[in-house]
Image (spheres, coloured by chain):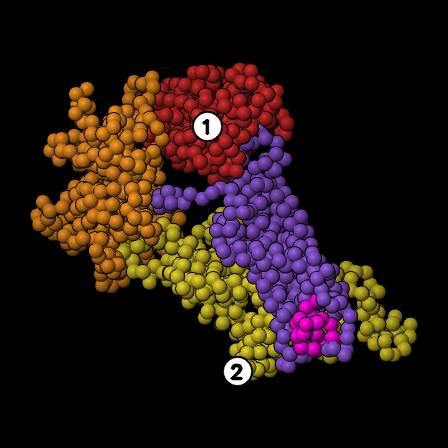
Chain colours: A red, B purple, C orange, D yellow
């Protein structure tokens, strides 16, 4: 479904991504692991069409994002949604939660997700259902982001991410700015939602254990290069790239 | 420190009403509203015609007829002060409104669209900073003749820059934030991103900037009028009145005291409101 | 150690650490008794007390881990030990005894002489550890000269020596600005700055949280190695149980400003007593061969702290009426103690 | 660093070019015929032939861009034309008056620094206490009082009432005090607040806490760690306020009857002495631009991070 082919990207003279290629199948979850500065977030931006790659192709359901402009790009975009790392920055501080959550639905009036069929014309009701899907009480509808806890904000961001029922949800470090005790809750939620909606995930993280929990396949990015791509079961295999093995060692200690 | 976020729970939408927490800001608000009230109902209040010269009564001391005395042409100082507030406040309001109307759209476009438009606007702004408003006013008054209109033009020509810069700065910062990116991914068209997500972020800084600028504009206008480069003599502008009083400074300092005090209190109250707003809205950059 | 050591300094260090080990072995370096930290001006009202009645000790050569989520008061405790609490907060109760001196009673000047020299601090925010517009070497020399009369050339030698000890290219780092270094390098330099004085205690406040997995492992290894050499005590603060369980000799778990469990690390790991510790141990993500169908979670939101009684009661699955009272610390086995009312029922299960 | 200087110099040239275009076109836009003004047409009979002759002598019959070019050539040779009033070259006239304005501004800057630095530091060390309150009130007054009125009040009290300082004239030290103070006071108040904000900002930075944790002495932290960072915003505003300093100088010069550049300009406006006005505008413009250049450069010297960042983009 998503195909990334030989993508390169440089900022100034700095090569951020170097010849990255992979695919994600419908309903599949690919974990992308890498240290800071490995180009993970840049890749996410390219797939979201927020930035242009220097070379290479990114196609979603056969449509090349890079060639699209304006309305066309907007139309294509509804199939890819995103959950960012920092839930504080990813919600507009001046809008109540419910408005943020259903904003995408307002932008695509013709999109009718299956779980919102009956209430498509009632904004508040849609927001209510979406919040319920991510385990938030409807009493939070009118709250502003600063009145929510970090975990609640991230749930709201996830609600916005799934609101268009996208075929691909990009999770860019969705748990790393949260407290340890909340990370597990969010991971569980993401896993449940994926099963419910049969979405594909590109799950970007530096946390091996989290990626292992969520994803079927894993890719390891090191300094802009894709050094390893394998099934999650093979994580401990001897055939792994030395860098992957070092990461596993560090993560699995004790 | 982690403590900080436990300790500071600031309201996100501080309404204007809530400013009353600080008595000194309230004083500013109160005194500014009196000035505005005087401007509006002033013509019905004045005891004497501010324009009629009466050489027989020139430089008269305060009396029942002339509460603050008369000036060198026998005109009632009190009446001239009251009518003078119209000139000062009117011109200032006009200047600030024009500046905002030019500055915000330019800043929005320059920040969001970027590219050549942005560099053109920024170079223009750079070029204009070489001429501080006072010098520009002197240049324009010098070549095109001293008048209130020319004075306003020169102030507007310089003042829009700070608005454009502030707005552009905020836009540049905000448009990279994740909520704007998320809105883009969620299919928000550009106009909606600007109006719904970006515009609200610039309202409070611009508000603060504008209130603080009101004082500055009043000071510039009256300084230039004092030099004779703004309001023309019969016009009862406060700075021009100070200029009129100059020859009699040693003998009758009141001639200069009253208009100066009026300027001072008006500017002070604007600054008090501006500072109060700045503290309330928690804007540190201005 | 790949570093070429200056023999004289090495001898000094060894002698010093030997002295410390033999002389102070049984006496705690740091003893905190009933420490409470409150907002200034509040009249000891419960809800303005951010840290409540803390008790713990660290002995020479020991590494004590302090665990807890953000807002649980870990960092505050550390700032209090250094006497660097923000102005709005103060120590409202209790004592901080450091090598026989009560730090809460010391004047600012006496405190300054202890800071850096006897108690060193490693920050989480490595970018904020050094002033951005002064070269690293100059800052290290500055802190050396703040504590002892030492000639500039000697100070330079000592700084370079310690930079080599923490395995960074000493000469280059010496003349670099902080922003020219990577996170790992900066944290190493902070470690050098900490160890230069041969301190009795190092407080490491989430020293690796901002670093990536591989770098943080290296930094912690280095910290542990150097500790063995120097023989100082370390207070390691982290929200990540993984590091604590691996590195610390003993640990204390905080929730909502209270220590709810403390003891030797192995005891806590194998036999956690407090419900919060149990949940924490279960909920951490562990990289294993098999993937669980669902991760164990701690219910509720962090920062949900009960105003009265046991701070965890609002999120506790075992909560009962008794929990509206502050539980006493109870000794379970050798030095392993916990504060929970429902221990018996727990053990019965 | 060098690349940066080059970039700023290019910007400087652009700004100066804009400035010259601006002044040149204002000159052309000015009402009234300079030829008639020079020939003193109000008082004398002027023949058509005289006019044509002068016009071609001045090059006014040539296309605008050639006039501009010639004017620019003159500028480079510091030939700004001659004053209509005094008949002296404008450049010489300005150089005669420059030292007076410099004396005034330097005096004002001294007043500013000697008030604002101690007051700023004190109010940052004791926020909310009396030095802070005083600086706050002073800043409010300083930002609200018209400088000419403030000067008048100073003259009234110190010269007329108390009779301890001379009211006008220049040359002696005591004659410099009142004008410098009148000009420097409002700036001092502004800078004290700026410095306070900057210091409070840097006191809350982690690296100050870190320096404390390393046991660095408090005075070293103030001067070597906090002050330098606090200086950055102060210096930025300093560049911007050079303009208002010069503007303020105009008013103060008139008030205290100092024959500086400012009073020259105002006199020139009333006598429509265009070359002088033009010279004044150009000189102050160049001065402000050059000052801003210095400010930018000092910025890079103060904070190595910026140097690197900007050079990366360049």
Q: Is residue B68 magenta?
A: yes
Whether residue A241 is visible, yes or no, is no
Q: Is residue A151 above or below residue B121?
A: above
* Residue count near mark 2 (Cα–Cα under 10 Å), binned few <14, some 14–19, many ≥20: few
Determine whether the residue tagged by mark 1 lies in a helix, strand or loop.
Answer: helix
Residue D229 within the segment the image draws in magenta: no
Q: Which residue is mark 2?
A: D162
Which residue is rendered at x = 64% and y = 50% of the image?
B100
Q: Residue furthest left?
A: C22
Report the side of A82 relative to B106 (left or right): left
Judge by depth and name the residue closer to the eye, B99 or B139. Answer: B99
What residue is at 55 percent from the left and 78 percent from the top?
Answer: D157
| Residue C291 position by quadrant | top left
| Residue marked by disc 1 | A139
The range drawn in magenta is B59-80
Distance, label 1 to label 2, CA atoms, is 71 Å
Q: Is residue D92 above or below residue C64?
A: below
Q: Residue at x 50, y 63 (%)?
A: D139
In this rendering, is residue A92 above or below C231?
above
Task: Name which quarter of the figure residue D13 lies in.
Answer: bottom right
């Amino acid at each position: 479904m998503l195909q990334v082919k030989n993508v390169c990207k440089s900022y100034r003279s700095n090569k951020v991504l170097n010849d990255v290629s992979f695919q994600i199948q419908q309903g599949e979850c690919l974990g992308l692991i890498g240290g800071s500065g490995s180009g993970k977030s840049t890749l996410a931006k390219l797939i979201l069409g927020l930035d242009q790659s220097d070379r290479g192709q990114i196609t979603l359901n056969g449509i090349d994002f890079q060639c699209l402009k304006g309305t066309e790009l907007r139309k294509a975009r509804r199939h890819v949604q995103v959950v960012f790392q920092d839930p504080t920055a990813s919600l507009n501080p001046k809008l109540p939660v419910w408005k943020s959550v259903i904003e995408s639905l307002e932008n695509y009036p013709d999109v009718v997700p299956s779980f919102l069929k009956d209430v498509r014309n009632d904004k508040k009701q849609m927001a209510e259902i979406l919040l319920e899907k991510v385990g938030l009480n409807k009493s939070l509808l009118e709250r502003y982001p600063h009145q929510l806890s970090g975990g609640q904000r991230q749930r709201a961001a996830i609600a916005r991410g799934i609101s268009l029922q996208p075929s691909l949800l990009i999770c860019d470090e969705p748990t790393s700015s949260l407290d340890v005790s909340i990370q597990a809750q969010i991971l569980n939620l993401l896993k449940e939602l994926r099963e419910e909606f049969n979405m594909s995930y590109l799950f970007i993280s530096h946390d091996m254990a989290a990626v292992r929990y969520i994803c079927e396949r894993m890719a390891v990015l090191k300094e802009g290069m894709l050094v390893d791509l394998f099934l999650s079961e093979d994580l401990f295999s001897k055939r792994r790239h030395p860098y992957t093995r070092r990461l596993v060692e560090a993560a699995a200690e004790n | 420190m982690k403590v900080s976020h436990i300790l500071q729970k600031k309201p996100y939408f501080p309404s204007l009403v809530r400013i009353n927490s600080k008595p000194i800001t309230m004083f500013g608000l109160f005194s500014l509203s009196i000035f505005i009230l005087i401007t509006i109902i002033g013509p019905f209040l004045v005891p004497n015609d501010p324009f009629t010269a009466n050489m027989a009564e020139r430089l008269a001391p305060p009396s029942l007829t002339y509460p603050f005395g008369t000036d060198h042409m026998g005109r009632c100082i009190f009446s001239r002060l009251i009518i003078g507030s119209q000139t000062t406040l009117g011109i200032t309001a006009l200047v600030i409104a024009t500046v905002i109307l030019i500055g915000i759209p330019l800043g929005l476009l320059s920040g969001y669209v970027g590219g050549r438009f942005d560099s053109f606007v920024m170079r223009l702004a750079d070029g204009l900073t070489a001429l501080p408003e006072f010098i520009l006013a002197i240049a324009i008054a010098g070549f095109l003749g001293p008048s209130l209109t020319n004075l306003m033009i020169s102030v507007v020509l310089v003042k829009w820059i700070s608005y454009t810069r502030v707005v552009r700065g905020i836009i540049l910062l905000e448009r990279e934030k994740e909520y704007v990116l998320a809105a883009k991914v969620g299919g928000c068209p550009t106009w909606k991103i600007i109006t719904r997500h970006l515009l609200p972020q610039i309202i409070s800084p611009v508000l603060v900037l504008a209130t603080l600028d009101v004082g500055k504009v009043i000071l510039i206008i009256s300084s230039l009028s004092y030099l004779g480069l703004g309001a023309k003599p019969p016009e009862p502008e406060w700075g021009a009145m100070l200029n009129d009083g100059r020859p009699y400074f040693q003998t009758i300092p009141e001639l200069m005291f009253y208009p100066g005090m009026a300027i001072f209190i008006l500017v002070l109250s604007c600054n008090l409101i501006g500072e109060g707003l700045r503290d309330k809205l928690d804007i540190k950059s201005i | 150690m790949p570093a070429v050591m200056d023999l004289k300094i090495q001898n000094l260090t060894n002698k010093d650490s030997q002295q410390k080990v033999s002389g102070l072995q049984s006496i705690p370096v740091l003893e905190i008794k009933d420490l409470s930290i409150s907002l200034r001006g509040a009249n000891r009202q419960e809800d303005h007390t951010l840290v409540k009645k803390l008790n713990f000790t660290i002995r020479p050569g020991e590494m004590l881990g302090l665990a807890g989520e953000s807002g649980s008061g870990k960092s505050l405790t550390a700032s209090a030990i250094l006497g660097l609490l923000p102005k709005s907060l103060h120590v409202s109760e209790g004592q901080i005894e450091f090598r026989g001196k009560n730090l809460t009673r010391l004047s600012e000047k006496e405190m300054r002489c202890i800071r850096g020299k006897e108690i060193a601090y490693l920050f989480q925010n490595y970018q904020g550890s050094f002033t951005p517009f002064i070269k690293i070497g100059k800052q290290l020399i500055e802190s050396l000269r703040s504590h002892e009369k030492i000639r500039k050339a000697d100070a330079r030698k000592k700084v370079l020596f310690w930079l080599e000890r923490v395995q960074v290219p000493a000469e280059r780092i010496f003349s670099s600005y902080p922003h020219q270094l990577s996170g790992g390098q900066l944290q190493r330099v902070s470690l050098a700055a900490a160890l230069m004085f041969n301190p009795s205690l190092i407080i490491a406040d989430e020293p690796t949280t901002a670093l990536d997995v591989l770098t943080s492992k290296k930094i912690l290894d280095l910290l542990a190695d150097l500790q063995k050499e120097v023989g100082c005590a370390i207070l390691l603060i982290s929200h990540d149980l993984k590091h604590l369980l691996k590195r610390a000799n003993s640990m204390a778990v905080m929730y909502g400003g209270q220590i709810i469990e403390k003891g030797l690390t192995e005891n806590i790991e194998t036999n956690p007593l407090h419900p919060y510790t149990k949940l924490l141990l279960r909920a951490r993500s562990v990289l294993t061969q098999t993937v669980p169908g669902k991760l164990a979670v701690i219910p509720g939101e962090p920062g949900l702290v009960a105003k009265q009684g046991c701070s965890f009661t609002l999120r506790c699955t075992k909560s009962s009426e008794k929990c509206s009272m502050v539980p006493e610390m109870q000794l379970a086995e050798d030095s392993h103690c916990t504060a929970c009312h429902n221990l018996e029922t727990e053990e019965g299960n | 660093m060098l690349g940066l200087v080059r970039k700023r110099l290019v910007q400087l040239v652009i700004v100066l070019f804009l400035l010259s275009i601006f002044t040149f076109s204002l000159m052309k836009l000015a009402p009234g015929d300079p030829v008639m003004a020079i020939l003193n047409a109000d008082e004398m009979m002027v023949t058509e032939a005289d006019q044509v002759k002068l016009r071609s002598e001045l090059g006014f019959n040539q296309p605008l861009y050639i006039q501009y070019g010639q004017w620019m050539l003159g500028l480079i040779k510091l030939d700004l034309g001659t004053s209509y009033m005094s008949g002296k070259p404008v450049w010489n006239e300005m150089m005669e008056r420059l030292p007076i304005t410099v004396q005034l501004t330097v005096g004002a800057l001294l007043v500013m620094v000697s008030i604002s630095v101690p007051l700023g530091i004190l109010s940052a060390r004791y926020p909310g206490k009396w030095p802070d309150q005083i600086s706050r009130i002073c800043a409010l007054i300083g930002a609200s009082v018209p400088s000419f009125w403030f000067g008048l009040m100073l003259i009234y009290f110190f010269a007329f009432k108390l009779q301890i300082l001379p009211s006008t004239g220049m040359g002696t030290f005591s004659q410099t005090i009142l004008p410098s103070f009148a000009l420097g006071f409002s700036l001092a108040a502004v800078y004290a607040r700026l410095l306070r904000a900057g210091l409070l900002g840097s006191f809350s930075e982690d690296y100050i806490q870190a320096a404390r944790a390393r046991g660095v002495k408090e005075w070293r932290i103030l001067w070597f760690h906090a002050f330098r960072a606090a200086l950055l915003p102060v210096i930025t505003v300093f560049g911007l306020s050079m303009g208002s300093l010069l503007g303020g100088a105009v008013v103060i010069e008139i008030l205290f009857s100092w024959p500086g550049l400012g009073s020259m300009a105002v006199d020139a406006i009333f006598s429509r002495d265009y070359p002088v006005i033009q010279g004044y505008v150009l000189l102050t413009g160049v001065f402000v631009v050059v000052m801003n250049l210095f400010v930018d450069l000092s910025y890079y010297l103060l904070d190595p991070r910026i140097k690197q960042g900007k050079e990366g983009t360049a």
